[in-house]
Amino acid sequence: MTKLLATSLAVAVLCATGAASAQTTKIKIADSFPVGHYLPKYFTMPMVERLKANPAAKGFEFEYYPAEQMGKAKDFLSLTQSGVIDIAYVAPGFVSDKMPLSVVPELPLPYSGSCQATLAYFNLAKPGGVLDKKEFAPNGVRLLFTIVLPPYQVITRKPFASLKEVEGMKIRASGSAKELLLKKLKAVPVLMPTPEVYESLSRGTIDGVLFPFNSLAPYEIDKLSKTGTIGSNFGSFVANWVISEKRFQSLPPAVQKDLMTMGEELTKSVCKQVEQDEAGDIAKTKAAGVKLTPLSQADQDTLAKAASEVSTEWAQTLDRRGKTGTEVLNAFKAGMGIK
C-alpha cells in the first residue's frame, strides 16, 4: 500500500487552483502502462500541461494513475462509462465484445510504419466518423487521440529460422485479428493483456510474442528473447484515449475545444515520433542480443496469403453478426490508399 501511494504521488500531475479557490474539479486519467512508458510521455503529459495553461481550466485538478492503479486494462472502458475514470486508455483489442469493429487497424494489412494506419483510423473513430457512430458514441465515450503501433513482429525465447519452425509455438497475441493469423500459421495464440506478458514469457508459459519493437524494452521482453522477424506485418495494435461523453459535456466549451484540437494534433505528431523512434528501438533490440532476420520470399508469400484470408474472414464474420465489417474494412483501407 505504501509503495502504491508513493508511486501515485510521484506520478500525479496536479493543476494549482489558487489559495482562494473554494472548489476544484478532479479529472482522473488512467492507463496500464508502466511508469516511464513512451506513450503517456507523448500523449498524457502534453495534454495535461496544455490544459493547465488554459484559463478556462482554472479550478481543475488532474490526477494521473499509471500501471493499472485504477483497474485492469480490460476494465477501463466500463470504468470510464461509470465515471470512476474520466479519461482512460482503452484498447479495443481488450474489449472486442463491445468494440469489435474498432480493432480494424490490427489486421495484417499491407502497410508499414504507424502514421498511414493511425491517420486513417483517426478519421473513422473521431466524432462524426463511421466508427464513432457505430461504437464510440453508443458506448458513451468519445475519442481524444489514438495511435496504431508499427507492424508487429514475431519475437521468441528460442531461435527460429522460418515460419515452419514457429508452428506449435505458444505465441502471445492481443485481439482476434492476430489470433486468427497465428492459427493460420499453425502457431498457438495465447491472448493476454500486455502487463502479464513478461511473467508468462519468463516462466515459459508462452514461447514468444507478437510485439512491435517500440514495446519490447518498456516491458523488458527483449531481455527474455533470442530471435525475431523484421520488416514483416503480423498485425498491429490500436491504443485509444477516450473521455466519457457525460464528462466531456460537463466541461467548459473552451476546454472541450482545446481537448479536440490537441487530440488531432497529438495524433498526427506522435505517430511521426513513434516512426522516428523505431530505428533506435530496433538497435536496442539487437544490442540486447535478439537476432532479427527478414522472412524468406517463400515465407513472405505464406504470410501475405494468410493475412489476406484473415482480413476477409474478419470482415465476413462481423457482417454475419450485423456489424458491417466489410464496410469498415473497406473504409479503413481507402483511408490508407490501399486496395
Image (cartoon, rainbow, N blue to C red):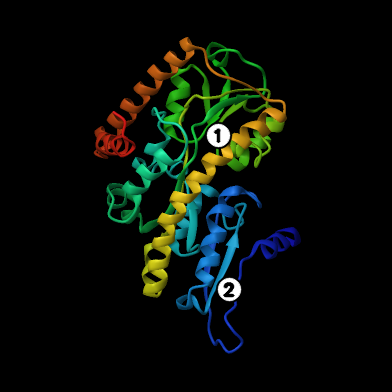
Asked if disc 2 and disc 1 are in contact, CB closer than 8 Å, the reply is: no
Q: Which residue is mark 1?
A: 212
| Residue, far right | 2
Q: Quadrant of residue 228?
A: top right
Q: Quadrant of residue 196?
A: top right
Secondary structure of the residue carrying numbered label 1: loop
Along the line of sight, which residue is nearer the eye, 339 or 178?
339
As drawn, 315 above or below 93: above
Q: Is residue 99 at least partly visible in the picture? A: no
Q: Quadrant of the N terminus?
A: bottom right
Mark 2 or mark 1: name the one nearer the start of the chain: 2
Residue depicted at 39% across the width and 42% down the height: 97
Secondary structure of the residue carrying numbered label 2: loop
CA neighbours of label 2 inside 10 A, class few (<14), some (14 to 19), many (20+): many
The numbered mark at residue 42 is: none
Q: Which residue is mark 2?
A: 15
Q: Position of residue 296 (x, y in %)?
A: 51, 12
Residue type at numbered disc 2: Cys
Q: CA distance from mark 2 to mark 1?
A: 34 Å
As drawn, 29 above or below 155: below
Residue type at numbered disc 1: Pro
Q: Quadrant of residue 168?
A: top right
